[in-house]
Image (cartoon, grey):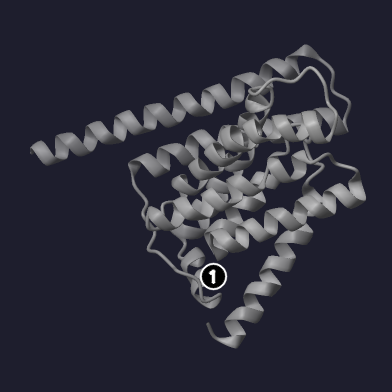
Amino acid sequence: MKKTDAVRRLAVLSLLIAVGVIISPILRVEGMCPMAHLINIICSVLLGPWYSLLCAALIGIIRMLIMGIPPLALTGAIFGAFLSGLFYRMSKGRIIYAVLGEIIGTGIIGAIASYPVMTFLWGREGLSWLFYVPSFICGTLIGGSIAYVFLRKLAANGVLAKMQRSLGAVSYRDQSSILSDSLTVAALGAILWVMLKLAAAVFALTSPVWNVLANVVPAAAAAAGLIYYVVRKGRDTDAEAQ
């Protein structure tokens, strides 16, 4: 590794840690921190699994020290961060696998590991092995969707590969497909959901209409992504038949 590459990596790592700490309170409740998963996936794609693991661990420690967050800041981040980078490398640059690694690492492994930590070390009662699974998975789906759309845009423009090369990291060609485009459309629903929730919190919008809208938007985006996939796949099949 060149010395300049190492310096750039440390600079980017420091920036991601700082941003991760600052944005972590957004939409956070105990057991769900979507923005942490956003940073995990971005770091995994840019720098790889080991840097992502270090990034998640340092963000978690800082949050525990200055924000009073329980050990969930670590158990809910480190496993997903490492698997996200590992899955991304093993899939030869498929961003969806980076998201999948985050979901499995945090939503399942991290959630289960949180039970003994919170019960025996933190003294939390009334928990079960699967207590944190629903909220962890929900958080990874939100943060993962935002990261997926963001990184897919960078990849489509060729910016992601340039950033990876400038950091001395492994770079991959954009592997866009009908499926990746469909997933991008579906993931936009999660981003819109976040925007609606933030608007409701900032402007104190308590009308039931906002709750209905927040649930309808992701469903509509998922349906649009599915329709897009079916239509495009059908057109390609017809074209090949001709």
Quarter of the image where one finds residue 141:
top right
Q: Which kind of residue does numbered mark 1 sit on?
A: Met
Residue 161 horizontal/vertical position (percent): 46, 67
Quarter of the image where one finds residue 46:
bottom right
Q: Which residue is mark 1?
A: 163
Residue 30 visible: no
Q: How many marks?
A: 1
Residue 34 horizontal/vertical position (percent): 69, 39
Element carrying mark 1: helix
Furthest residue to the top? 208
Q: Residue at x 12, y 41 (%)?
A: 240
Q: Residue at x 53, y 62 (%)?
A: 48
Above or below, comparing residue 71 to residue 170 in the picture: above
Residue 99 horizontal/vertical position (percent): 52, 44
Above or below, comparing residue 34 to residue 158 in the picture: above
Residue 173 visible: yes
Q: Residue at x 37, y 51 (%)?
A: 176
Taking the image as shown, residue 104 lies to the left or right of residue 214, namely: left
Q: Nearer the viewer, residue 25 or 60?
A: 60
Furthest residue to the left? 242
Residue 1 horizontal/vertical position (percent): 52, 82
Quarter of the image where one finds residue 132:
top right
Q: Nearer the viewer, residue 108 or 28?
A: 108
